[in-house]
Amino acid sequence: MSEPDPPGAPPARPTDEADATPSAATPRADADVGSSGSVEVRLTDPGTSGAVDVRFTDPGTSGSGDVRFTDPEGQAVPSPPPPGASQPARRKRAVTIPAAVALKVGEKVVHAADAIGDKVVQASDSITVKVGESLAQLPVVPRTRRGRVMARNVILSFVLVFSWIAVIVGLQLRHARPPDFRPLAEGILVALRDGRADDVYRASSIRFQEVVREDTFVAQMADMNRTLGPFEEISAVLDTELNRGPGGRTGRVDLRLDSGAGPTKGSMAFRWESGAWKMLGIFIDVPPDVAPPTQEQREARVKGPQEELRAAAQQILELSARGEAEAIWQGAALGFQQSIALPNFQQTEADRRKVLGPFRRILDVTSARQNPSGTGASLTLLIEFERATITGSFEFTKIDDAWKLTFFKLVLPLPRVPE
């Protein structure tokens, strides 16, 4: 009976023959020492890979060992040729990846993708936390009396600014928008084109009728139609303006017009009377290509009837020389009568006679002009009186084919220095 092995000691080797006999799968070493002094060790595994022969040559000669591999059938595999000899061509072995290796590679790829996703999530979480901390650490007003006063001032400033903006916007929205004068102006222009200037005049403002006579207005509109051609349309409204003054509510509209002669500009004024807007004035520009191109042509277009105007001025001066100031005033136009009262005119004529003396003659006609419609004219004369030769100016308007005085002015000489 043998004693047990001490703890940690290596296991005991078998001693009986049954345990020492090599099995079919156990390597076997046969030592055969011959005369050559070589040792042959043969590890056999007949069931699988065959045998490996190991021979040790004489240590006294080369000290090398020959290793020979044999195939499973026991045939020796030819040894490699010596160095320098030509080697036979070898066939490349097909490389195949076992299923276990492919499975392991796939698992590693999946684990790498999961790791990358985890890193991205961790990075986003860290960025969110840092941003939240930075927002939470914004500067705040210190909780002191000075800080509270500053905060109240800032809030009050914003409230005042926004309140002022709201008031301005509210006032602009409450302000009445200007009326649309375009339909009214277009109706007036169409009526003037169709030759109904008298209807337009009767429907105009009272203030307009006090300043302009009907026949003058009709003649001026006829000349406008001849110059500009027939009215076509209002192409655009350029500006609209409203005013309120002592004369009441008035409005003005600037227009761009299209007529037979081409595009032009114009404006109309209106006055609020009896609950409606009525025409207070009209002005139309003459296009440059329609107006006379030269100064001579423009002067010829406005040249007045010199002989007719001179005869009318001669008659007025003769009445003034005879002291008939009332006859001059009665024969003048309504505008002249409204500009000066009869007693004041009589007193003015008396003062002129004292300074100038009686009228003698007209020396020269300096200028005689009339408007293109032929309804108004002006005259400038060189007049000789008994005591002085002066310049006189007259303006007339044609009423019922007769020139009526609208303006009368004599330039008195300067007083002489006494000798």
Image (cartoon, grey):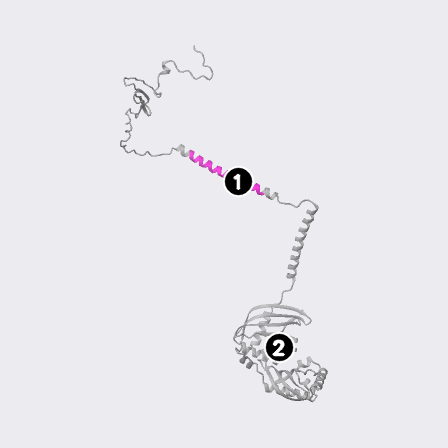
Region rendered in magenta = 104-131
Q: Considering only vertical position in the picture, is 86 above or below 418?
A: above
Rounded to the nearest angstrom, the CA distance separating label 2 from label 1 is: 87 Å
Find the residue positioned furthest to the front.
419
- Per the image, the residue denoted by label 2 is 201
Tag 1: Cα neighbours inside 10 Å, few (<14), some, or many (≥20)? few
Q: Would you say the magenta stretch is mainly helix, strand or loop?
A: helix
Q: Position of residue 12 (x, y in %)?
A: 42, 15
Q: Which residue is mark 1?
A: 123
Mark earlier in primary sequence (2, 1): 1
Q: Which mark is residue 16?
A: none
Q: Quadrant of residue 385?
A: bottom right
How far from the left and from the top, in percent, is residue 281? 62, 74
State the SS at label 1.
Answer: helix
Residue type for callout 1: Ala
Residue mark closest to the camera, 2 vs 1: 1
Q: Residue at x 64, y 76 (%)?
A: 208
Q: Secondary structure at mark 2?
A: helix
